[in-house]
């Protein structure tokens, strides 16, 4: 009995330390919904994009040929779709994570969530600046891969302050981004796969592994 009590005490101490050092209020359902939003956004973007006349295999033509033939202002439409998906995803994530934190009698904004934000923010901001430079230079074919790679780096960096599963999502995003760089002209498909399908799968795993158990 004494040994069992000791193990129980150690387990309790470990849980308390983990709660104080890691942000465990991330909502798996928000990941699923973020993926759904991304797939909807990709579907809308696909409907407004002119069809390819031929499969583009040359890297330079993949960056310029299709986009230069777009109707005026289409790049702003695509940008608005991406920003809309981002804002709705962030809003949903904050709302559902706050609700989960409340159920667990935790503060959603604490030392661990600040550390999580600080760790992930630098790669995200760097990636955003890099993507904007690509846009200015008309290197459109590299924008989607860049978003995937830097988003993956942000997840890997932030994963030390939350569930370890986030790290694997980040690694998969990086791999997808690198593959997208080798397949110019298919950025939208990789974007939908990375931000859409992977998020749905990740969110579902997180929900059944953590959220439903603790509900």
Image (cartoon, rainbow, N blue to C red):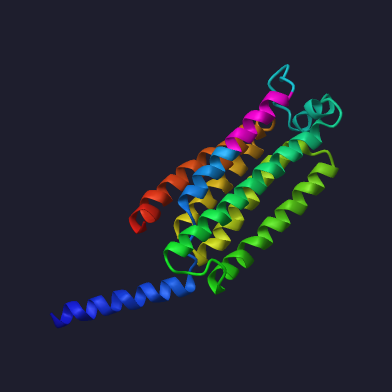
Q: Residue furthest left?
A: 1
Residue occupying image coordinates x 51% and y 65%:
160
Q: Is residue 194 visible?
A: no
Between 87 and 189, the one nearer to me in the picture? 87
- Counting from the top left corner in percent of width and height, residue 206 is at 42, 51
**Magenta span contains residue 41:** yes
Pick the quarter of the image with the C terminus.
bottom left
The number of discs equals 0
The answer to whether residue 136 is left or right of residue 206 is right
Residue occupying image coordinates x 63% and y 67%:
118
Query: With respect to residue 196, does 210 lie above or below?
Result: below
Query: With respect to residue 44, does 206 lie above or below?
Result: below
Query: With respect to residue 62, does 86 lie above or below?
Result: below
The residue range painted magenta reads 38-49
Query: With respect to residue 54, does 63 lie above or below?
Result: below
Q: Which is the main secondary structure of the residues drawn in magenta?
A: helix
The answer to whether residue 76 is left or right of residue 208 is right
Between 51 and 100, the one nearer to me in the picture? 100
- Counting from the top left corner in percent of width and height, residue 83 is at 71, 44
Residue 41, picture quadrant: top right
- Counting from the top left corner in percent of width and height, residue 149 is at 63, 49
**Magenta span contains residue 93:** no
Residue occupying image coordinates x 15% and y 83%:
2
- Counting from the top left corner in percent of width and height, residue 109 is at 57, 68
Q: Residue furthest top?
A: 53
Residue 75, picture quadrant: top right
The answer to whether residue 203 is left or right of residue 78 is left
Q: Is residue 100 visible?
A: yes
Between 41 and 132, the one nearer to me in the picture? 41
Residue occupying image coordinates x 49% and y 55%:
166
Pick the quarter of the image with the N terminus.
bottom left
């Amino acid at each position: 009995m004494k040994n069992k009590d000791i193990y129980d005490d150690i387990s309790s101490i470990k849980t308390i330390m983990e709660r104080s050092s890691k942000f465990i209020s991330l909502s798996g359902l928000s990941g699923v919904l973020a993926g759904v939003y991304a797939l909807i956004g990709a579907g809308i973007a696909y409907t407004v994009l002119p069809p390819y006349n031929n499969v583009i295999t040359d890297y330079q033509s993949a960056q310029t040929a299709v986009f230069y033939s777009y109707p005026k202002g289409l790049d702003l439409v695509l940008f608005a779709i991406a920003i809309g998906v981002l804002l709705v995803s962030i809003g949903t994530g904050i709302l559902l994570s706050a609700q989960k934190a409340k159920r667990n009698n935790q503060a959603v904004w604490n030392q661990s969530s600040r550390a999580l934000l600080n760790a992930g923010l630098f790669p995200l901001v760097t990636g955003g600046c890099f993507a904007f430079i690509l846009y200015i230079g008309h290197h459109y074919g590299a924008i989607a891969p860049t978003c995937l790679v830097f988003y993956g780096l942000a997840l890997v960096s932030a994963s030390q302050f939350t569930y370890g599963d986030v790290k694997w999502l980040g690694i998969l995003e990086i791999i997808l981004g690198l593959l997208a760089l080798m397949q110019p002209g298919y950025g939208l498909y990789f974007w939908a796969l990375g931000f859409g399908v992977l998020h749905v799968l990740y969110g579902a795993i997180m929900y059944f592994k953590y959220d439903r158990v603790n509900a």
